[in-house]
Amino acid sequence: MRFQGLIPALRIFALPLRSHSARALQRPPLPIPSATVLKAGPTIPFLGALFGSSAKTESQPNNMSYPDQRSDDAWQAVLSPEQFKILRQKGTERPFTGEYDAHYPSQGVYNCAGCDAPLYKATHKFKSGCGWPAYFDSIPGAVTRHTDRSFGMERTEIVCSNCGGHLGHVFKGEGYPTPTDERHCVNSVSLRFKEDEGQGN
């Protein structure tokens, strides 16, 4: 047949192609210049805190159990929107705007605005100039401390020991001339003042 002579010729022609493609498959991959290799950059923890949502965890402070175990719905029924935002969602009022910032009575008690538990005596309050009510001490057992690592920093949060309501933060070693060298920086919205000091003794 006419094509019988072509088959050996095609085989010979195809051999270099086959061997060439086989050699190509056996070649090691070309090296990638180190300048083009992308590396992961360092993480910045506080950015996650600034832009991430933590409202769900904040409504249950530090997973602790407090005597007053009302639900968020129950709290919303008795608190103003601002009180709920600060006491239950750990918000902060603007400095120098709170009702008790410049409030210095000679006697009385500052109670929790949520559950009415006594927290601070009037005699604990001092003038700090920080823009929020400041106390150098609290009624024994009234305030619970937690480590707060939000916003890429470590602070000590203070909450009401009865309901877990957020009060503010406590700072130590600032040099104020007080017996404890502490400043309980508290939101006015978290407090309710009562002139009768009897329940705080």
Image (cartoon, rainbow, N blue to C red):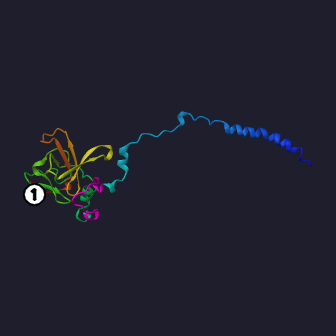
Q: Is residue 83 left or right of residue 26?
A: left
Indicate the quadrant containing the C terminus: top left, top right, bottom left or bottom right.
Answer: bottom left
Image x and y of residue 175, in percent: 17, 38
Residue occupying the point 46% across, 40% down? 40
Q: Is residue 70 part of the magenta span, yes or no? A: yes
- In the image, is residue 27 above or below residue 199? above
- In the image, is residue 123 above or below residue 74? above
Q: Is residue 101 part of the magenta span, yes or no? A: no
For mark 1, does the 10 Å Cα neighbourhood hold few (<14), some (14 to 19), or many (20 or more) residues?
few
Secondary-structure class at tag 1: helix
Quarter of the view holding residue 178: top left
Hey, what amino acid is under mark 1? Gln
- Residue extending farthest right: 1
Image x and y of residue 33, in percent: 56, 34
Q: Which residues are magenta?
A: 58-74
- In the image, is residue 50 above or below residue 60? above
Residue at image mark 1: 199
Picture mark count: 1
Residue occupying the point 24% across, 58% down? 83
Image x and y of residue 62, in percent: 28, 52
